Amino acid sequence: MLVFIDESGDSGLKIEKGSSRYFTIGLLVFEDNEEALNCDQRIKSLKKELGLPENYEFHCKRNSDKVRRAFLVAVSPYNFFYYGIVINKNPKKLWGEGFRHKESFYKYACGLVFENAKEKLEKATIIIDESGNLDFKRQLAKYLRHQTGEGVIKKVKMQRSESNNLLQLADYVASVINRSVQNKRKWSDEYRKIIAHREIYVQIWPK
């Protein structure tokens, strides 16, 4: 079982100074490794179809509408499922010293989405984008093992999203959820509908 996680938005609380209103984590699961490989190959072939270089990195925020739709349609037939956690950073609802620190904020959000997905996970290999603070990502791996209990997580790997097509899919999952919840951007709901049949549960917290 392979699990890929990525985020959309930021953990900052100063919304009036440019921080995002929502922080979203997408958790993408492939129960079958061969299916994951097939999806990876499909994303690779899509780059060629779109006239993009082989080392191109799909990134939902930067991509055009044409590329977003092509990407989501291409991956939608493959047998994966996903969970999401959306943190509403409304200052009237989100309080506590821990949320003022990026590391503890991120750990807490990851803990929530893994708790929701735990019943579906067994001996999972977790792949996290290694960009950013590598020491923190190691702390996060330790934290997740402790939070989920024995037998849920087998291994945690750090890889770069630019060279991992399925981390790029996790980026899309997180971004599509985030856009849909905000419902302010053009076609935000349409993107989510394309992969809605792969969605298990998306939690918005706090209500």
Image (cartoon, rainbow, N blue to C red):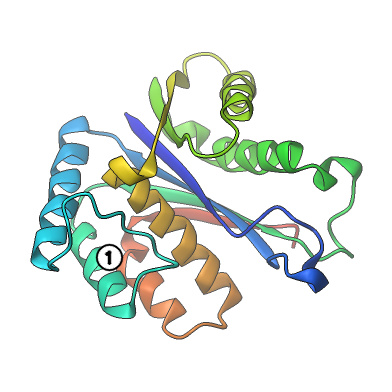
Circle 1 Cα neighbour tier, 10 Å, few/some/many (<14 / 14–19 / ≥20): many
Give the x, y percent position of residue 166.
Answer: 30, 44
Q: Quadrant of residue 13?
A: bottom right
Whether 185 is drawn above or below 159: the answer is below
Give the x, y percent position of residue 8.
Answer: 54, 57
Figure quadrant of the C terminus? bottom right
At 31% from the left and 54% from the top, the residue drawn is 57
Element on which disc 1 rests: helix
Q: Amino acid at mark 1?
A: Leu
Give the x, y percent position of residue 156.
Answer: 45, 23
Asked if residue 130 lies left or right of residue 73, the reply is right
Whether 201 is drawn above or below 149: the answer is below
Residue placed most toward the observer, 31 or 87: 87
Q: Residue furthest bottom?
A: 186
At 75% from the left and 57% from the top, the residue drawn is 206
Q: Which residue is mark 1?
A: 72
Figure quadrant of the N terminus? top left
Asked if residue 6 lies left or right of residue 95, the reply is left
At 52% from the left and 71% from the top, the residue drawn is 179
At 86% from the left and 63% from the top, the residue drawn is 91
